[in-house]
Amino acid sequence: MSEPVLSVRNLTVAFPTRRATLTAVDGVSFDIGRGEVLGVVGESGAGKSLTGAAIIGLLEPPGRIVAGEVRLNGQRIDRLPPEEMRKVRGRHIGMVFQDPLTSLNPLYRIGDQIVETIRTHTGLSEEAARERAIALLQEAGIQGARARIDSYPHEFSGGMRQRVVLALALCAEPDLVIADEPTTALDVSIQAQIIALLKRLCRERGTAVMLITHDMGVIAETADRVAVMYAGRIAEIGPVRSVIKEPHHPYTRGLMGAIPSIAGTASRLVQIPGSMPRLAAIPPGCAFHPRCTLAFERCRRERPEPMPAGDCRVACWLVADKRAEASA
């Protein structure tokens, strides 16, 4: 098996405060291969975006990585100086955020921004970089790219701006793209177009993608594998088809049960009781146990580590019990 593009091992992110150190991402591990899309899903506050920010070195102080490691193509990047990390971000890691205006400077023409990025990381001439920028915009679905390259961001719709951002993220041909809620602010029809575009562009280039979202529909449509996060930990990770069709973790089952069926056969959607715990009040043992109807004493005392369950890995003592019964 070839080396993964991105390898994250036991990543832990903490925020020191006057009263205590709050752990927001707790021992997260996963790999993403070339041309693969890993979806990261969970409720707000699960630690999805924070994991992405830690990988690309954009943690807001006082947040910092306190344990674990992040490797890109085998090279450790979590300890790089800020200036070196900035070069890695531009050349080897592309970023697509929820709000396109986060990535685009409203005072500069989109062409100038893309050309500058291309020239910074490839050394092409001004003319060659401009032609490449036009080609990228065309590939990203911008009609009349040659005429619109000198437009400002405010002259594009939200969906068109997100296409520009996608072109900007891919202009240096990165090894990894981290897309943080890239379709949340868009209409449903535009969402589908952006998802299809992201999928196609990255597959054609063999780019690894970390797709962060709270939308299981987007995950089902786009991802090859999915990691379900809860309270800063991975509850379940595996092939997207397996996780959707036969979820093992009670939290994953709750997420699946909350999705309306197109057939409309269910009389009532599943509701997960309670809410995500605050960082200062994460319970001992399995963090999900206060909301879990299947929890037992061990869940309240011991934290489960991800363990094999079919072709998935699941952090749940129910899985351990089933494995013990099967081997007895």
Image (tube, grey):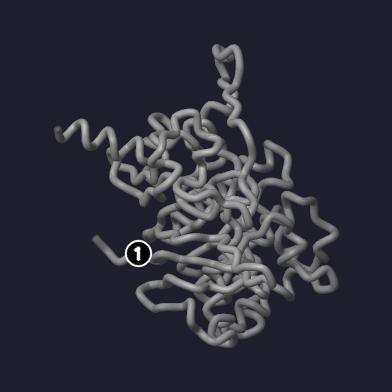
x%, y% of residue 234? Answer: 45, 51
Q: Quadrant of residue 245?
A: top left
Q: Which residue is mark 1?
A: 4
Q: Residue 17: in sight, yes or no?
A: yes
Seen as rendered, the residue at the extreme left is 328
Judged left or right of residue 235, residue 59 is right
* Rendered view: 139 above or below 112: above
Residue 297 at x, y percent in the picture: 41, 38
Q: Residue at x 67, y 79 (%)?
A: 116
Q: Secondary structure at mark 1?
A: loop
User: With respect to residue 244, does 301 lie above or below?
Assistant: below
Q: Residue at x 74, y 75 (%)?
A: 112
Lateral position of residue 308 relative to residue 303, left or right: left
Circle 1 crowding by C-alpha within 10 Å: few under 14, some 14–19, many from 20:
some
Quarter occupied by the C terminus? top left
Identity of the amino acid at label 1? Pro
Task: Residue 256 in the image: state x and y as whole percent.
Answer: 51, 31
Q: Nearer the viewer, residue 126 or 206?
A: 206
For the N terminus, the quadrant is bottom left
Residue pictured at 73% horizontal, 71% vertical: 111
Point 21% across, 31% down: residue: 325
**Residue 70, can we see it?**
no
123 or 223: which is nearer to us?
223
- Residue 16, how many percent across, how many down? 63, 72
* Front residue of this view, candidates 48 and 209: 48
